Image: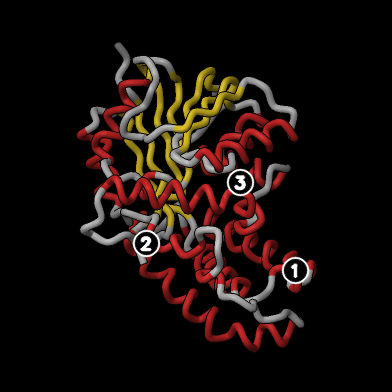
Amino acid sequence: MPASPTATPEHIKDVNTRYHDAAAEEYDAKWGIDFGDIGQRQVRLKLVKALGGLDGRRFGDALEIGSGTGYFSLNLVQLGVIEHLTATDISPGMLRRLAATAATLDLDGITTVATEAEELPFADESFDLVFGHAVLHHIPDLDRAFAEFKRVLRPGGMIAFAGEPSRHGDRLAALPKRAGLLVAPAWRRLIGARRRAVPEAEQSGGHALEGEVDVHAFAPADLRKLLRDGGFEDRRVGGEELLSNAWGWGLRAVESSAEPESVSLRWRRFAFRSYIALQKVDTGLLEPRLPAELFYNLLVSGRKPAA
């Protein structure tokens, strides 16, 4: 469940820091994060959807909010979409993992800064792009954060965020999660996986905090208002992932019931390929035709007015 409505911003930030610090080393494996061709294609497509196209555009100085382990930003750097990256997160542990991955990938021009989104330690008009993935729903004061995004952007600069949970999608996700837990015993027998000895939520390392780190689920109108009140132009809000996300949450539920090393590579390949297949159906068939409100994830972008 999300953070309590009475939780203070300080409590929310403390929980987010502790949870993400604890989760950093296992995060990429847990969520199947890829820094190869597949991850790069996924990330590029998300940015194209958010901005309404890319057309060969490159961003010289880019600031990522809530960088985590670098899924969004490091893949964009590898693609050449970003030249100089400043990666920020409230979690120093996540930034250490990002820096280690960047070194492994032999990527240059990357700076990491531990900071809150509502008070960025950067000069006015420092960046051409402010972006992030699955981060806005963790930020207590979004009005302040959007004001900071605009402040540090150069005139004509863009903001782009993807992977934000919609209110409707959040409710939809509860169904495959419950279904996954119900079929988990039969699934383990079928593939020969062992039941997890200690439930994930009860493990040490901050797993029990996972239910407290989310603050918001959005209606598209909420994001449109943030853009409008923040003074952004060329405002866009869209939806992505319906079938693929429902399937993905079901897969995540059954897999979380098993000891990770007992889940076969054959199953993992099937799970990934089936998710990608449904993602293609969403992208090609459903997303162009259905309203953003129906999808699990929302994308948002806008442009700071030129001087």
The 10 Å Cα crowd at callout 3, few under 14, some 14 to 19, many 20 or more, is some
**Amino acid tagged 2:** Leu
Image quarter (top left, top right, bottom left or bottom right) of the N terminus: bottom left
Residue 52 makes an appearance in the image: no
Q: Position of residue 181 (x, y in %)?
A: 53, 81
* CB atoms of marks 3 and 1 within 8 Å: no
Q: Earlier in the sequence, mark 1 or mark 2?
A: 1
Find residue 261 and name its label: 1
The residue lying at 38 percent from left, 41 percent from top is 300
Position of the C terminus, as image quadrant, is top left
The residue at the point 53 percent across, 22 percent down is 59
Residue pictured at 58% horizontal, 48% vertical: 24
Q: CA distance from mark 2 to mark 3?
A: 21 Å
Residue extending furthest front?
A: 204
Crowding at label 1, few (<14), some or many (≥20) Cα neighbours within 10 Å?
few
Other residues around mark 2 within 10 Å, as few (<14) / some (14–19) / many (≥20): many
Colour scheme of this structure image?
secondary structure
Point out the frontmost of discs 1 and 2. 1
Q: Position of residue 187 (x, y in %)?
A: 66, 83
Residue furthest out toward the top: 307
Residue 42 marker: 3
Badge 2 element: helix
Residue 294: image tag: 2
Q: Residue at x 75, y 68 (%)?
A: 261
Q: Judge depth for marks 2 and 3 and give the one in front.
A: 3
Observer-side mark, 3 or 1, equals: 1
Of the two numbered discs 3 and 1 on the same chain, state the one appearing first in sequence: 3
SS category of the residue bearing label 1: helix
How many marks on residues? Answer: 3
Secondary structure at badge 3 equals helix
